[in-house]
Image (cartoon, grey):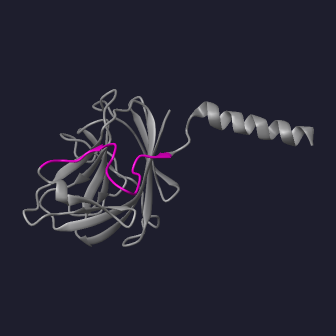
Amino acid sequence: MKKAILCFLILGFSVVVSGQKLKKIFNGKNLSGWVVPQPNYDNWTVKDKMLLVKSSDDRKGSILWTEKSYKDFIVEVTYKDVSGVVDSGVFLRGENDQIQIGISGSLKRDLTASPYIPGLRYPSEAKTDGILKVGEWNTIKIKVVDKTYTVWLNGKEVMTYVSEKIPASGPIGIQLHPGNNMSIQYSKILLAEI
């Protein structure tokens, strides 16, 4: 019994010390804590506890940024393609490194969970065969430490990449890519600083 209690205390302490408990950064009610892009405010709405990202008639893109900047972190998003050719993503520490969600506009194929970096395009391709659930809910978890990020799709590790271009800190962004008629829902956006 003493061993069980000691084990429980050690495990509980390690969770607290690690500080990796994921917390909601999208509250399901409004966009508090986020910088809503102007004039594309209507592309970003909260409905039924979900973030709905939808192209406008002019198909201009925009990025929803966290108000806060982050250094090392884990971010987890749960999303579902709703309509059109979805081209979205999660920006890491600013507008350089991004983890793709959906169809690459340049390569015309699904590169979900792969990094996109301006000038390098897709330097590494995530292995998502048999893991990505097209048209269903998917969860992407991204761990960023220094210049290295690791990506999991639906609980399976699919890619690790070392980026020489990623800034040391910056906000996290959710992308609505320009040029497409699309919509995507995010039911959860969670984060833990590490």
Which residue in the rendered view is the most extreme toward the right? 1
- Does 32 lie within the magenta span? yes
Percent coordinates x, y for residue 1 in the rendering: 92, 43
Percent coordinates x, y for residue 143 in the rendering: 45, 41
Q: Who is closer to the viewer here, 55 or 126?
A: 55
Which residue in the rendered view is the most extreme toward the left? 58
Q: Who is closer to the viewer here, 8 or 35?
A: 35
Percent coordinates x, y for residue 54 in the rendering: 22, 64
Percent coordinates x, y for residue 27 in the rendering: 41, 52
Q: Who is closer to the viewer here, 50 or 109?
A: 50
Q: Which residue is rendered at x = 25% and y = 52% of the image?
A: 175
Asked if residue 106 shows in the view, the reply is no
Residue 77 to residue 93: above or below: below
User: Is residue 41 shown left or right of residue 192?
Assistant: left
Q: Which residue is rendered at x = 31% and y = 30% of the image?
A: 164
* Residue 83 placement: quadrant: bottom left
- Does 183 lie within the magenta span? no
- Count up the numbered dots: 0
User: Is residue 52 shown left or right of residue 131?
Assistant: left
Asked if residue 51 shows in the view, the reply is yes
Residue 181 to residue 69: above or below: below
User: Is residue 157 shown left or right of residue 180?
Assistant: right
Main secondary structure along the magenta-highlighted residues: loop
Magenta-colored span: 23-38
Residue 17 to residue 46: above or below: above
Q: Which residue is rendered at x = 59% and y = 33% of the image?
A: 18
